[in-house]
């Protein structure tokens, strides 16, 4: 279960990075078109591209920080479980089994 949770976070972060990369690529194409049409100067185009790169770098850094925070939270959950009594662990196991057995609804 822990591995599935970690994989989900990893996929989410990678999706965000991929979306950001696609956005930058598409935005750079648009800037290049504007420069070709004369609606932007080459210098303005370079400045826009640099700003886009900074924004993507910031987004990637924020996603990495979020992933790191989730990993810390996960470790904290493991610590809490380690401190549970035998009765609390049995209750948790029963709850998990009940949750896994119940039908899932799609949102």
Image (tube, rainbow, N blue to C red):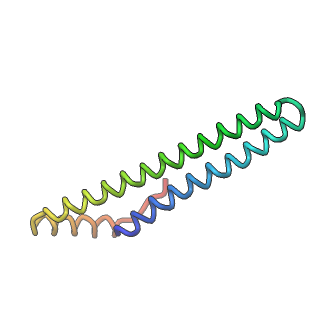
Residue 14, position as x, y percentages in the image: 54, 58
**Residue extending farthest front:** 43
Q: Is residue 74 above or below residue 37?
A: below
Q: Is residue 44 left or right of residue 59?
A: right
Is 1 drawn above or below residue 63 in the view shown?
A: below
- Quadrant of the rendered structure where residue 29 is? top right
Q: Residue at x 59, y 40 (%)?
A: 55
Left or right of 60? Residue 88 is: left
The residue closer to the viewer here, 84 or 78, is: 78
Q: What residue sits 45% from the left and 65% below the top? A: 7
- Residue 53 vertical position relative to residue 75 in the rendered view, above or below: above
Give x and y (percent) for residue 4.
Answer: 41, 68
The one of 105 and 85 positioned closer to us in this rendering: 85
Q: In which quadrant of the rendered view does residue 54 lie?
A: top right
Relative to 55, is 97 on the left or the right?
A: left
- Locate residue 98: give its quadrant: bottom left
| 15 left or right, relative to 7 | right
**x, y percent for residue 57:** 57, 46
């Amino acid at each position: 279960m822990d591995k599935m949770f970690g994989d989900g976070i990893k996929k989410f972060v990678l999706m965000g990075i991929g979306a950001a990369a696609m956005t930058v690529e598409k935005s750079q194409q648009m800037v290049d078109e504007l420069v070709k049409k004369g609606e932007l100067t080459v210098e303005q185009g370079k400045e826009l591209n640099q700003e886009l790169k900074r924004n993507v770098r910031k987004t990637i850094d924020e996603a990495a920080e979020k992933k790191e925070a989730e990993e810390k939270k996960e470790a904290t959950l493991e610590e809490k479980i380690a401190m549970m009594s035998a009765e609390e662990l049995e209750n948790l196991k029963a709850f998990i089994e009940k949750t896994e057995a119940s039908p899932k609804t799609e949102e």
